[in-house]
Image: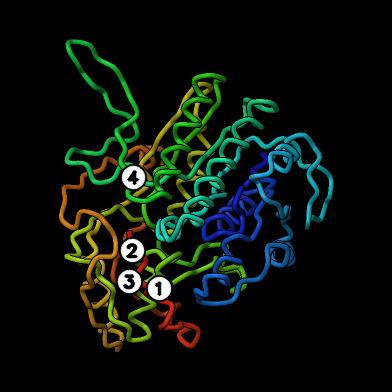
Amino acid sequence: MTHILILGGDGYLGWPTAMYFSNRGHAVTVVDNYWRRNTCNTQDVGMLYPVPTLQERAKIWFEKTGKEIKVVIGDLTDPEIMRGLFDGRVRYDWAVNPEFSGIPETVVHYAEQPSAPYSVMNYKTANFTLSNNLLVTNNLMFAVRDFSRETHIIKLGTMGEYGTPNIDIEEGWLEIEHKGRKGKFLFPRQASSLYHTSKIMDTDLFWFGVRMWNLRVTDLMQGPVYGMETEESAIDSRLKPIFNYDEIFGTVVNRFIAQAVVGYPLTVYGKGGQTRGYLNIKDTLQCVHMSEKTPAKAGELRIFNQIMETFSVNQLAELTQKVGNGMGFNVEIKSLENPRKEAEEHYYNPTYQGLIDLGVQPHYLTTEVMTGMFALVAEHKENIRKEVIFRGVRW
């Protein structure tokens, strides 16, 4: 049994990851400061259904499975809170066994402000995004350097770091020949928001730590995730992850399905040719697990592109319309003036073989999968507020 520390354990991906590892016999500790929950309230954006607190969810998980997930509530931009997770000073806010779990063999780093629109709403949200994301990453890097250089860090990056270059996107690295000499460099990156810029800086921080102190880091360049159901959440409906359907925190597939269920025209920005890589939430869990099972070597920054297939926005809208109409919903697609500065028609050909080579078995976005998502969202139709779906954050 190994100790898995999950930073950002209350989030859309954090809590499912905690249950996933706990269900497989690992000792799991989750840390969060409830920023996302609180910001959903301050920004007046809706969640599809109420979600119990981390302490409550950990209790439910223990009651249903007999397995413990320890909970720490704290702000990881405070270096002493981060360091306390490694040196025994941590105070658990919920634990069956309050003894220190010990230095983690693996840290899964989700503890960042995750929204591109939020990061560019105004200078205050921009400042928060940069300060929060970079301080948490830097605090983690120094804690591992000072207490446990053998700990494997799995950091969630984003495919948005790459932008939409007019060349194939490799998995993190690029071989370059220049004036008769060759070298291997981080793939050129061109972020489309300050959130994505902060993720580029995360990669650069860890690349520094890898080169200077032989840290072990896996950087998962993840595309937009969809879905709300995992093997573990099926145990009890109260264990489902946070699910947003709004413009600020909701991902596009989740948003489109919620819009279709309440008869809100699907919000296609501009020409709708924007193409990205997507994956099911179940595959996020697989990818993190396979990365944990085969950790990066000392002095290695290992990068995987964490997607399973690519779609344009138009393709997603058309699939949503097809499935929704087949279920009796009257789904309309509406093109809006694009509030974002982005290429609406572009070349996009990323490589994403590395995680499949490790053993990940992809789930694809089929009509059957989307039908199941429609059914789950429709159960909470009365909670969907049309007025928070789109507010046109521009940049």
Query: Where residue 373 is drawn, which disc sits there?
Result: 1
Q: Earlier in the sequence, mark 4 or mark 3?
A: 4
Which residue position is annotated with label 4? Answer: 191
Q: Compute the Cα span from label 2 to label 3.
A: 34 Å
From the image, tell me which residue sits under label 2: 394
Tag 4: Cα neighbours inside 10 Å, few (<14), some, or many (≥20)?
Answer: some
For numbered disc 4, what is the local secondary structure? loop
Q: Please say if 98 is above or below 139.
A: below
Q: Earlier in the sequence, mark 3 or mark 1?
A: 3
Q: Quadrant of residue 174?
A: top left
Quarter of the figure that contains the C terminus: bottom left
Point out the tag, 2 or 3, that comes first from the N-terminus. 3
Q: Nearer the viewer, mark 4 or mark 3?
A: 4
Q: Earlier in the sequence, mark 1 or mark 4?
A: 4
Q: In this picture, is 385 found above or below 270? A: below
Amino acid on which disc 2 is placed: Arg
Scheme by which the image is coloured:
rainbow
Q: Are marks 1 and 4 in contact (CB under 8 Å)?
A: no
**Residue 314 at x, y = what percent?**
20, 66
Q: Which mark is residue 368?
A: 3
Badge 3, how many Cα within 10 Å: few under 14, some, many 20+? few
Residue 385 is left or right of residue 395, and the answer is: right
Tag 1: amino acid: Met
Image quadrant assignment for residue 232: bottom right
Circle 3: element type: helix
- Residue 319, x across and y down, in percent: 24, 71
Circle nearer the N terminus (2, 1): 1
| Secondary structure category for the residue under label 2 | loop
Q: Are marks 3 and 1 in contact (CB under 8 Å)?
A: no
Q: Give how far apart the Cα atoms at labels 1 and 4 are.
A: 30 Å
Give, as a three-letter code, the residue at label 3.
Answer: Glu
